Image: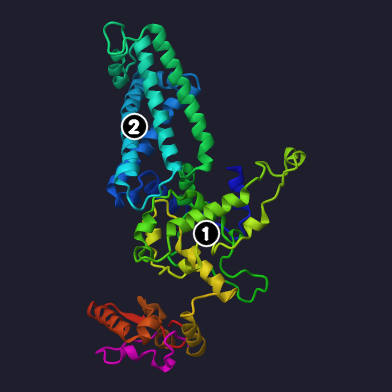
Amino acid sequence: MARHLRIFAAARAAGPSPLDHVPARIAGLIEYAFIQTRMFKDPRAAILHLGIFWGFVLLTVGTANIVTGGLIQAVISMPFDGALWAATLNMQNVVAVIVLLSILWAFERRFISRPARLTYNTDALVILAMIGGVVASELFAQVFEVARFGEQPGAFISNALAPLLSPPGNSLFDIDASGLEIGFWALWWAHMGLVAAFLVYLPFSKHLHIATSFFNIYFRKLKPRGELPQMDLEQEDATFGLRTLADLGWNDLLDGFTCTECGRCQQACPAWNTGKPLNPKTFIMGIRDMSVEAEHGLPLIPNSPSAVSFGLADSIDEKALLAPIVDNAIPFDAVWDCVTCGACVEACPVLIEHVDKIVGLRRNLVLEDSRFPAELNGAFRNMEGVGNPWGQPPTTRTDWTKGLPFSVPTVAELAADGRLDEIEVLYWVGCAAAFDERNRKVARAFATCLDAAGIPFHRRPGAAHGQ
């Protein structure tokens, strides 16, 4: 995690402020992180994930009690003569079974049903096995404890399973007292060992999203979808758009470490679904892989004397940090396959922003490298010459209004009369609806609907690009 944070610090673009729109950010945290509303676009996966997520969170009480030597139990048992702790054990027994069933279901999805959108790798299997091991070792350690030392109020599942182990001669397994103690001891330490191994493995795994997703959701983009950062074209030393990891914001790099590899963005992407090379999932995973490569070998503590004594470099690998994102995290052709519809962003359960990054890459390719598909040459020449990609005379920009049985006033006309405060709806027509005959029909139909509904609207004057 320390190395990840050093990469975040190397990002040049500013990220969102934690004090900006706090109520909206907290509301989003509750909706998307705790309730996980976007997960329910696939109900089966949502039920599975909620079973694992909330079960794992609630069972942390038991792990904390073990780590603290029973302190949690002592505190919770004080009021109501231990009734609260009995209720806690009851909840933990139920939740443990739910988690184990969810883990089995997750293995079924990866080995049998195998949804096409998922990423199939060893990492996911290791994480599922670790979670299952942590939960199973805690539950069965309690079963052995009950079998040896007596029932525990509230732990009804453990109390029900314990008779299968003892007493000898009257149970399924006939384990004596010393065997029960050894079993309890082995499972107790197995639980602690798995918890420690899980915490060590977590920062290197895609399962790190259990920590980063809360921050990613809180710091999500609140500006309108599609609004891009402004560029100062007069600044001589400016980098236009996005080229390297250093040009991204820290929250963009956080996106990479938050990706769950669930593939919902891939499944929603029209470019991917029509056989094009763009895959929004592998793009974000590529940014994460580039970040990991850049942080490789960094000491955990900056300017650490121990790093110097061992001859370790104390700076980020500049070559890796300044490597171009295009052709590393995403192929050149895929950058231009995106239709900027935002379906990937809308589908992502942890609110990763794919489109803004792709558009930033396009900006850089065009403005700095003059590298773009040959098909755009004509459109660029037309925009430079007459202000629209179709190459039509600017004087025909308002021809789409001809033949309408009502007038479509412009904002300039209201401004001339000093009536700008009367504007309710501003219709931005754009070049497509102004010059393409097929889209002109759409503009006329839309204007007709607004007029029929009695909604006063105005359009931009037809003078500049896109107006």
Q: Which residue is pictured at 37% across the width and 89% down the height?
A: 398
- Under circle 1, the secondary element is loop
Asked which quadrant contains residue 171, the reply is top left
Q: CA distance from mark 2 to mark 1?
A: 36 Å
x then y, percent, for residue 426 = 37, 77
Q: Amino acid at mark 1?
A: Ala
- Under circle 2, the secondary element is helix
Q: Is residue 148 above or below residue 343?
A: above
x then y, percent, for residue 437 = 32, 87
Tell me if residue 129 can be seen. Answer: yes
Instruction: Determine which of the numbered discs, if any, sits on residue 329 in the image.
Output: 1
Q: Quadrant of the N terminus?
A: top right
Asked which quadrant contains residue 461, the reply is bottom left
Instruction: Determine which of the numbered discs, if any, sits on residue 100 in the image.
Output: 2
Q: Which residue is pictured at 65% across the width and 45% down the height?
A: 297
Q: How is the image coloured?
A: rainbow
Q: Is residue 53 above or below residue 235?
A: above
Residue numbers of the magenta segment: 387-410
Q: Quadrant of the C terminus?
A: bottom left
Asked which quadrant contains residue 159, the reply is top left
x then y, percent, for residue 138 = 40, 24
**Residue 20 magenta-drawn?**
no
Tell me if residue 57 can be seen. Answer: no
**For mark 2, does the 10 Å Cα neighbourhood hold few (<14), some (14 to 19), or many (20 or more) residues?**
many
